[in-house]
Amino acid sequence: MSTDPDHALFVAILDTGSIAAAARVLGISPAMVSKRLARLENRLGARLIERTTRRLHPTPVGAQLHADLTTILSALAAAEARVTGAVATPAGPLRIAAPTSFARLHIAPHLGEFLRDHPAVELELSLSDHSIDLAAERIDCAIRITAHPPAGHVARRLAGNRRVVCASPAYLADHGAPATPAALAGHRLLAAEGQLPWTLLRPTRRAQVAGVSHVRTNSSDIVRELTLAGVGIALRSLWDVGDALADGRLVRVLPEWEGSSDLAIHAIHGDAPRPAVTAFVDHLIAQWSPPPWETLDSRTASDQTGIN
């Protein structure tokens, strides 16, 4: 099986980030890489890469072509491997996008072992709490906490995302504890922009909690710190507050109620992921089976009676 060599050259330019780096990977001169790129652009009648003094940027059509060709080239490599019986070794650039706090707490601690197991992988981790265009940003795999994975990609579910209502013991000592979801209206609620209203569930029952955050912020990290400081009550993911619940800095409020269960942690990637992507996702699944934050909750649930 084969494809146009200029296609692979174009992908190599964007994957490596420069014409010089692509030339080293391909074993040809930078001048030849530039000549073949120009030939491909002339043939297609479209500019694929914007060249600046500092770096290369794909044009919109270039980003889409890169995404399409990456999928095609990966599928061809996988097909050839199935024919020959070869097992591809994870190697090359691996660009991962993930939410900032989640990556710091639950991805970064496992990267050392992954890189020791796969020394040929060149890892790049991009952190952002906003959804990004995987093709435009040349991301191989995005870790997202979402109820609706984007269409056109493969979404592997990595773990659930249980959310609990919690507050510090100091806040509850000063303000009392709500006995029902409706009673939350009389308390200081804490949430980042777009995180209210809350939907709370218990078997056979559902409650909607409306309101305005006592402190307005666009940072979920700030909400966590405010909750720990005794400013108010928050609805937080167990992966974020499991340690604070375990050591008593926070306690469950309305422990029979939890946030809606539609959110989950997914790995989002293309239809034919490269071996490095598959290895990375498999590594995370192995670390989170079961999720450590769920284990923390099960150990502390019997120790915290909460307020009903």
Image (tube, rainbow, N blue to C red):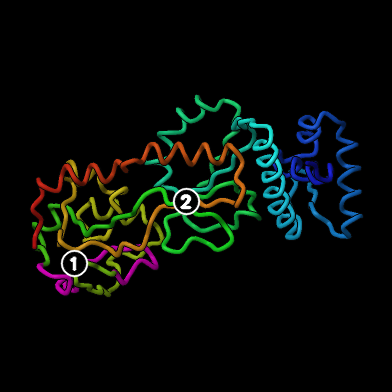
Amino acid type at circle 1 is Pro
Tell me residue 281's x, y (percent).
48, 42
Report the residue at 37% width, 62% height from top: 217
Amino acid type at circle 2 is Arg
Q: Quadrant of the N terminus?
A: top right
Residue corresponding to mark 1 = 203
Report the residue at 27% width, 66% height from top: 214
How dense is the environment of label 1, judged by Cα within 10 Å: few (below 14), some, or many (20 and up)?
A: few
Tell me residue 199's x, y (percent).
28, 70
Q: Is mark 1 in CB contact (under 8 Å) with mark 2? A: no
Tell me residue 128's x, y (percent).
50, 52
Tell me residue 270's x, y (percent).
60, 51
> Please, is residue 269 above or below residue 35 in the view?
below
Asked which quadrant contains residue 274, the reply is: top right
Which residues, given as a range, are shown in magenta?
179-198
Helix, strand or loop status at disc 1: loop
In-front residue for pair 231/251: 251
Left or right: 296 as drawn, with respect to 56: left
Numbered label attached to residue 156: 2
Instruction: Say if the magenta span includes residue 130.
Output: no
Numbered label attached to residue 27: none
Helix, strand or loop status at disc 2: strand
Report the residue at 76% width, 31% height from top: 25
In-front residue for pair 42/148: 148
First in sequence: mark 1 vs mark 2: 2
Q: Quadrant of the C terminus?
A: bottom left
